[in-house]
Amino acid sequence: MATFRILVTPGDGIGPEVMEEALKVLGRVQQRFGHEFLYEEETIGGAAIDRYGVALRPETIAKAKASHAVLFGAVGGPKWDDPRASVRPEDAILGMRKQLGLFANLRPVRVSPELIGESTLKPEVLQGVDMVVIRELTGGLYFGKPKRRWENAEGRQAVDTLRYSEREVARVCHVAFQLARQRRKKVTSVDKANVLRTGQLWREIATEVGKQYPDVELEHILVDACAMYLVRRPASFDVIVTENMFGDILTDEAAMLAGSMGMMPSASLGRQRKDGTGIGLYEPIHGSAPDIAGQGKANPLAMILSAAMMLRLSLGLEQEAKAVEDAVDAVIREGLRTPDIAGPGAKVVDTRTMGSAVAERI
Amino acid sequence: MATFRILVTPGDGIGPEVMEEALKVLGRVQQRFGHEFLYEEETIGGAAIDRYGVALRPETIAKAKASHAVLFGAVGGPKWDDPRASVRPEDAILGMRKQLGLFANLRPVRVSPELIGESTLKPEVLQGVDMVVIRELTGGLYFGKPKRRWENAEGRQAVDTLRYSEREVARVCHVAFQLARQRRKKVTSVDKANVLRTGQLWREIATEVGKQYPDVELEHILVDACAMYLVRRPASFDVIVTENMFGDILTDEAAMLAGSMGMMPSASLGRQRKDGTGIGLYEPIHGSAPDIAGQGKANPLAMILSAAMMLRLSLGLEQEAKAVEDAVDAVIREGLRTPDIAGPGAKVVDTRTMGSAVAERI
Ligand SMILES: [Mg+2]
Ligand SMILES: [Mg+2]
């Protein structure tokens, strides 16, 4: 019987509600496959600001580092929204990524046949969409220095800096190629090599890393073309890998293919061990949704699918991950819907009923 | 009788073919409305490299500066594609923008009811889409310094710089608000103010400029949210204004709403005179399409609609611009189609027939 340590950080808003359902599903996985999941729970985000004065305590980081994975709910809410505040709920996720060295953000985009009508794109265009967008998470335009504002004789000025090193590009490309190997064996590297020096570096390194994976096809496209093709021929993508800000834009665009954010999981990964696993942080891409918190309206499937990614990527439990994903597919096929994905005449259920239904099907 | 000087630069590939049709249409406008258009024609792009060794001659710039507007076809082709070449066809457009001080790129996106089926988005989502995306063209991430590559003990490195001054942001925002006044009176300013210092500056200046246009509504959205909303609720936009690279990405995504690039015009504008007009460069967003050059398959409507933008924005001829746009709408309504926009069973016509049809309807 394998034992795994998991840090659970439910956070704010609907975070605790959807986390409860993910834990319910994981409980069923333990039982069914005979693993032992040892949980630690920590308060983070706005709740931690209220309780400790900071969004993320050093103790929480220490526990995260001693774990196989972190299951992260959501943080933030109007109570902590003051832009002048010195502590912000988002510090929890930014701090966690930084302290754990998580440099690759993975967002799978799959369109299930039953929900194909939810999107603004035509069903025939969405047929077969199944991609993972990998965004470099700790470098690029969001973190480069100088990053400042000043004033001179010509008025106010501001600068941000897009900087990459060979090492930063290579490690995230490796994540992409390794993932593609387990999938349809195609990597699309997205850059702006025709205008940016960092884009040239990105393309050069992606090409070199690609040579180490001769079984994986590599294509290069420009970021503006990618924004176009995501709408034009989304089913042509398998794994996309790109710069931090490009990824920020493209993942949000890609999320629209699925129609609802309520179903979309994500993973943030750092260095991988030889067996391909490593510590990771798993969170739904929807936020804390304070407007519906505590009402049983939240869709727990994104959190549950994040837990499935954890099983696969940090715990190395592929079969178990698949069992959870199949159970989610099954409840969708059976017509269970939380309000966010309920079309006319749908069987609307609450958060707990949805979670229990998934657990029962494992 | 008003006289206007227009510099015509057909360029490469299908450029000359579509230009011929635009001039045919302008000929009809002259006749019908009693204006005099004085044309100068210059060789640019690949054709100029072959003839003069450079893509853009100083003489051409001088003629452009002495004109009311530049009608620009398209440049480039496989013959001049060597990335190591010291002269490139694209130098023509980049040089023209720089020398003429064209800092605002305008791309209208309209979906005509007859072509609504061409898009990958659902018709009901496209209903009423009518926006102009304005991209800052001479600053931002594509031009900031330092912009270089080097190597150190940790390997290869690269940097690009996103820099803006108050003045650069303000002038392009003014273009947006002035345009919105002639339209539905809404400006969406797109930035990344939550992460970038240049984004904060952008939002601050856009807000200040907006105060001078109290009759125009101003909304701010983040660039990743904009990428999402363009797919989710495109009809909600009127005028969008944004940073150079954001605009590069968002305009290409927005182009997909219309289904085909063959219909999409653009304008690049510099400082405006008191009456709101000023020198501008007008070009279709499709490229030189060397694969179909000389076969009569090119769609001339993007070039013709670019000429309509010229009539409105550089010559101050609103009624004439509208007459051209209405004529384009009419031929589309009557079912005339070039191959790029021809659905099953459509009346396919060649480039010249399409151009003549538009001219006749003015
Ligand atoms: Mg984003
Ligand atoms: Mg572009």
Image: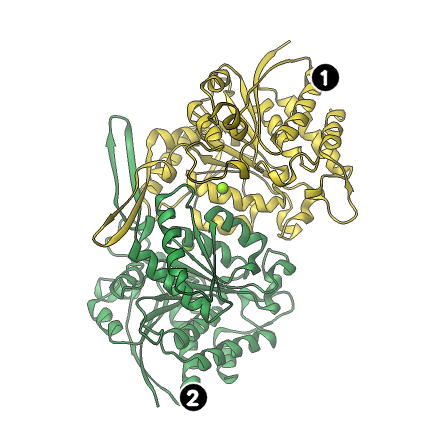
Chain colours: A green, B yellow
Q: Is residue B361 left or right of residue A84?
A: right
Q: Position of residue A16 (x, y in %)?
A: 38, 71
Mark 1 belongs to which amino acid? Arg
Q: Secondary structure at mark 2?
A: helix
Q: Secondary structure at mark 1?
A: helix
Work out whether residue B232 can be spotted. no
Determine which quarter of the picture holds residue A212. bottom left
Q: Which of these two is toward me, A310 or A162?
A: A162
The answer to whether marks 2 and 1 sit on the same chain is no
Mark 2 belongs to which amino acid? Phe
- According to the picture, the residue beneath numbered tag 1 turns out to be B32
- According to the picture, the residue beneath numbered tag 2 turns out to be A33
Work out whether residue A126 can be spotted. yes
CA neighbours of label 1 inside 10 A, class few (<14), some (14 to 19), many (20+): few
Q: Position of residue B35 (x, y in %)?
A: 65, 13
Question: Within 8 Å of ligand 1, the CB of disc 2?
Answer: no
Q: Which of these two is toward me, A21 or A157?
A: A157
- Which image quarter is the N terminus of chain A in? bottom left
Label 2 and label 1: CA atoms lie apart by: 81 Å
Q: Position of residue A110 (x, y in %)?
A: 53, 66
Q: Is residue A245 left or right of residue A117?
A: left
